[in-house]
Every structure is written in structure tokens, then in C-alpha cells.
Image: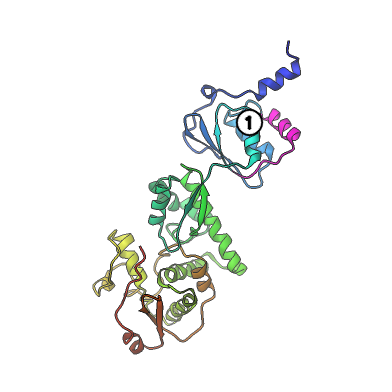
Amino acid sequence: MIPLGLGVIIYFNSPVQPENIPELTADIDGIRKSEDNVYFFDVRRGESSQSVGLRLERARLIKNRYFWNLLCRWKKEQIKTGIYRLEIPASQLAIHQLLVSGKQILYRVTVPEGVTLRKTAGILEEAGICSAEDFIEAARDIEIINAYRIPNSSMEGYLFPDTYLFPLEYPASHVVKAMADNFYNKIEEIDPAVKSLSSQELNEKVIIASIVEREYRISEEAPLMAGVFYNRLKINMALQSCATVEYIITEIQDKPHPLVILNKDLEIRDPYNTYIRPGLPPGPISAPGIVALRAAIFPEKTDYFYFRLNDAAAGKHYFSRTLDEHISAGQLIPKGRS
């Protein structure tokens, strides 16, 4: 006969059978069912082992959270933050060993600098992280936008371009929040003083950075470009950025990237067209990286009001003070980023 104490241990440690687990139809409390008997479990930063046990019990993935707490005290190994793939049935001991191992099932995905929300969505879908449609929907979710105090209709420009590790079929809202958290961490590293800016003041810098990101080729020219745009804003002069016209063509009109910007393109009636509308466009036009963000926060102070690409191979621009100098620099050339 098995002693009572040992019998209790065996019972509570034994796996919960899949047929006894309620069906999860959505991401509930950081737990999501991926496929038959496979769950993604999110251990949050700073979360206690007791909180983890409570969530496991609520989802019926373990039989008893109090046994879980005793197990954690006995093993004395810290549960590590991250996203884990749980294959059910699994004993409490097996689940505990996984969560203290730090062995997450994650996939690497790189979001390049200068991409738009739509292109980011395609990258994530191709990598199997989340569907493009779900990502766009999450990036336009008013609750998420308000949580980050962004005065725009989407998270465009606030999702930092970087290399990320995500599980497959990860909730799009989690992806958006992870990228946004990374963005705010990065800009505070550039300048801690940005925390004191109003949401509108920060938004103006992000818009400038998003335009600079699509314009510059040589990193040392980025602050000069930002300075040009700020100089124009001061005198209510149109920014006249080809990048904003390209954004209209590719993102709003959903047309292929133009090989050349034509005069008719500069006359497109759209709020994002900075050739016919002075001031900033309604929102960012791309995901700016460190160089562009730093340039927008710390622009070069000059008396330049114009710049034009004059060496496509080297990526160099000609900066000028007057319109006559600018015109003499040559024809308009789009930057060619896809």
C-alpha cells in the first residue's frame, strides 16, 4: 500500500489529461493553445512562482497550485521570464523543469529599418509569427495606441526595427507591444530627456525621424537632413520630401515603388504629400532606427534649406541654402527603398 503522503504527491504531480482541460478559444491570462495539446505559456517579467502556479491551475494545466508552491520551494530554482511551449499531458515536475530551464521555443525575425507597418506585417507573416491581418489590426487597436499615448491612428513609426525572438503563432498584440516597448527603451537610451516630452512633441520627432530614415544613405548626413526639415518647419515652408510621396504611392495607393518621382506625383492631393502641404504629414511614414531617431532628437544646426542626392553610388547628398543652388544640383532621384 502506498503511504498517504506519497499518494498525495503522486496524485497532484500527475499530468492533467487533455480531455479534462477546458477549451481555450483565445489568449487567456498569458496562456494560448497553439495546436492539439500544445500551449504557449508566458512567464511575465518580475512574476512570482506563486502567480505562475495560479495561472496554470486556472487553465487546468496543473491540478493544484499549492502543490506547485511546495514544489517551487523544494526545488529552489528560479522560474525564468519568457514564452514556453507546453506539451500536455505533463507532470507538475516536468512543467517546473521547463520553466526554470529557460528553454523557450522562439524564432528569430528581423524587421529592417525604414519599413512600414504593412511591410512589417508581411515579414512577420512570412516568418510564421502572426498573420499580417492580425498584426495590422493590433497596430491600429485604439486601446494599445492610447496605452502608449500615441496621438495617431496607428503604431506606425513606434515599432522599433530590430531582430526579435518570438514563438510561432504568437498573438499579434504581444508582438506590437514588444516592439513598442523596445522603441521606448531605445529612445530613452538616446536621450533620457525624451521622457519629459509631451506625446505631441515626441510624435513630431518620430515623424521627422521616419522621413530622415527614408532619405539618408550615409549616417553622418542624417542630422543634416533633420536640420533642414526643422529649418523649413520654422518658416512654415513645405518639407518637400520625396519619401512622403513614395509613401503615398506604395502604402496608400498600393502601387509599385516608383523608379523616378515625376512632376505629376508631386501634385498628388493627399495629406502626406509634403510638396503641396506645409508642416508635418499626419503621422510617421516608416520605422526609424537609431541613426534617424538620434538625428531627429539632436539635429545639426545649419542654415541649409535644401538637399538633393548627387552621388547615387556613394549615397551622398548636396546640401544648399538657396533654391537656385538646389535646382543646379540636378534632377529629383527617389531613394529606391522597397
Label 1 secondary element: helix
> At 43% from the left edge and 47% from the top edge, which residue is drawn?
127
- Residue 297 screen position, x and y as percent: 53, 72
- Look at mark 1 in the image and give the residue it sits on: 94
Q: Is residue 182 above or below residue 55?
A: below
Query: What stretch of residues is rendered in magenta?
Result: 65-82
In the foreground, 138 or 131: 131
| Residue 40 placement, left or right of 337 | right
> At 31% from the left edge and 83% from the top edge, which residue is drawn?
330
- What colouring does the structure picture have? rainbow
- Residue 46 screen position, x and y as percent: 66, 47
Secondary structure that dominates the magenta span: helix
- Residue 182 screen position, x and y as percent: 55, 57
- Residue 200 screen position, x and y as percent: 50, 67
Residue at the outermost front position: 313
Is 67 covered by the magenta stretch? yes
In the foreground, 160 or 141: 160
